[in-house]
Image (spheres, rainbow, N blue to C red):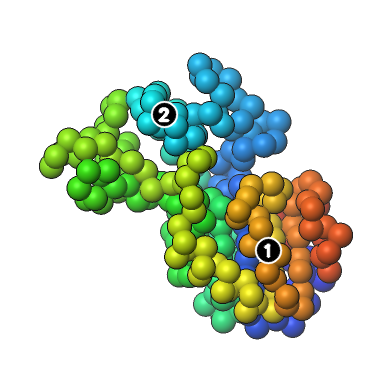
Amino acid sequence: MNEQLKHIIDDSSRIVFFGGAGVSTESGIPDFRSKDGLYHQKGFKYDPETMLSRSFFDTHTEEFFDFYRTKMIAPNDGPSAVHFKLAELEREGKLSAIVTQNIDGLHQLAGSKKVYELHGSVMRNYCMTCGRFYDLDFIKSTIGIPRCPEDGGIVKPDVVLYEEALDDTVMEGALREIMAADCLIIAGTSLAVYPAAGLIYYFKGKHLVVINRDATPQDANAELVIHDRISTALL
């Protein structure tokens, strides 16, 4: 672990980890905006940002699910050492919460208990007609538009698409944790997606740490900035 980061963690008792796509790349999941990221991949009729919008979901539902199955729930390596390290910090009483922009559910698989998923999760899927719950395996087992066996309703992933609002309860919980934190570690995010990125402005604690390969808007305000992989800094 980075020596200065270790000192900050030792000095903190209520850490919040605010993570983005760079956390999931440690598990073999592509990020969004890098040159090899999801938004620069070819092979589809429409650009990825368009296909991840609610209006596209409503008007091109089958094409949405073709893209979703291929790119959004693609195979990965499971929780990385970073995910397990964060779960360990929680068990030790150092980490009070994880606030994540990722939808892969890997933090929970690694053992983390208090996770605020700002953009939802591929692990949860609901019938838009009756509200019945379906897991990820159900979506993977279907072809075309997944439909509820009970009433034929479309089964929509519980992920926040462009043009959709974030869940108020999740946002309020994440905000409370950030406001109460004495240390905020921002990692693997360019802080370009709002309103999620706006949450960090409510942090008034002692230690602000930024871990990201590229510069972020918060670099100038941070006590410690590490332009490297998260695993290199945290492990």
Tag 1 and tag 2, C-beta contact below 8 Å = no
**Residue position marked by numbered label 1 in the rendering:** 200
* Residue for point 30% across, 25% down: 144
Separation (CA) of disc 1 from disc 2: 31 Å
Earlier in the chain: of badge 1 and badge 2, it is 2
- Point 77% across, 74% down: residue: 207
Q: Where 103 falls versus 146 (above or below)?
A: below
* Dot 1 amino acid type: Ile
In the current view of this chain or complex, which residue is farthest to the left?
150
**Quarter assignment of residue 179:** bottom right
Judging by the rendered image, the residue that carries numbered circle 2 is 64
Residue shown at 69%/79% (left/top)? Answer: 182
Q: Quadrant of the C terminus?
A: bottom right
Quadrant into which the N terminus falls: bottom right
Q: Is residue 190 left or right of residue 26?
A: right
Q: Is residue 167 left or right of residue 222?
A: left
* SS at badge 1: helix
